[in-house]
């Protein structure tokens, strides 16, 4: 068994399937290249974190790391998700760590700058 | 005058200053390298889009492009922001185009993959 935790890319979720499609595309490069990584939704869409942890446990995973597909931390990441993690750790007997939201990584600021340059190139 | 529209990086906004600080950092590389680019908030924080457009007009700008610092399009980007744009175009006599949310650009999926690899590297 690898010492790495299984990665869960956590998106907010929505009843609008277009919302979820965007996050599934965003998760694509990670899901294709990081073994055992999954996407999960906080609410309003499936799979939920509970579903993903539950399936991971079935296949022998005991440690998870949630990487939030959020640009910044609001109430959800400061309060709701930590509360969900405490419950999931108890009910499944697993360890779950919560990474910073992706938007706190400088890599994202650079990607945004590239996107803006692409937008401007359309005008020239 | 350049033919390029002035870039407005649009974030949601929050009364929590930590939220805005994260977006200001995210915007940093763009603000530093794209002349005339600004950050604006949809609600709950300043500067608002109205403030930024108003100041742009004062300095001679007549065309703006809003690049949403949102990972996906929900009600805000499908309805609220287009409504705000129509009002701003009327009241300021300007042209404002709305780009896709940054999360629809494949660049972001690649950046997320890099972030995940950095998270995993902390464990090895």
Image: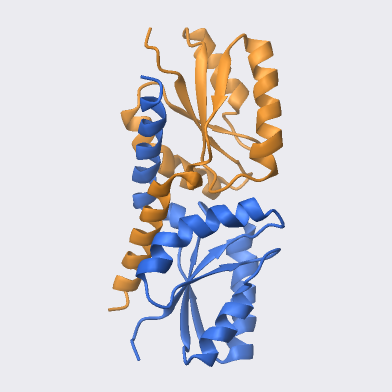
Chain colours: A blue, B orange
Q: Quadrant of residue B36?
A: top left
- Residue located 62% across and 8% down the image: B93
Q: Is residue A105 left or right of residue B8?
A: left
Q: Answer yes or no: is residue A101 visible.
A: no
Q: Residue A29, can we see it?
A: yes
> Which of B71 and B19 lies nearest the eye of the viewer?
B71
- Please name the residue shown 62% across and 52% down the image: A19
Q: Position of residue B91 (x, y in %)?
A: 68, 12
Q: Residue at x 71, y 27 (%)?
A: B83
Q: Position of residue A65 (x, y in %)?
A: 46, 75
Q: Residue at x 63, y 35 (%)?
A: B42
Image quadrant where one finds the N terminus of chain A: bottom left
- Vertical placement of residue A84 versus B22, above or below: below
In the rendered image, the vertical position of residue B7 relative to residue B43, given as above or below: above
Apparent side of residue A124 relative to residue B23 in the rendered image (left or right) = left
Percent x, y for residue A113? 36, 38
Q: Quadrant of residue B86?
A: top right
Horizontally, residue A11 falls left or right of residue A26, namely right
Residue B100 image position (x, y, % from top left): 53, 37
Decide: is A120 above or below B71. above
Q: Quadrant of the C terminus of chain A?
A: top left
Tally of numbered discs: 0
Which of the pair A107/A55 is nearer the observer? Answer: A55
């Amino acid at each position: 068994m690898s010492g790495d935790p299984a990665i869960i890319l956590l998106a907010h979720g929505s009843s609008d399937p277009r919302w979820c499609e965007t996050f599934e595309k965003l998760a694509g490069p990670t899901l294709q290249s990081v073994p055992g990584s999954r996407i999960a939704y906080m609410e309003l869409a499936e799979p939920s974190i509970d579903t993903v942890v539950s399936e991971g446990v079935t296949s022998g995973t005991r440690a998870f790391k949630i990487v939030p597909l959020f640009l910044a931390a609001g109430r959800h990441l400061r309060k709701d998700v930590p509360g969900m993690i405490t419950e999931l750790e108890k009910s499944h007997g697993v360890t779950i760590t919560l990474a910073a939201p992706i938007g706190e990584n400088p890599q994202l600021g650079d990607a945004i700058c590239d996107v803006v340059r692409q937008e401007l190139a359309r005008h020239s």
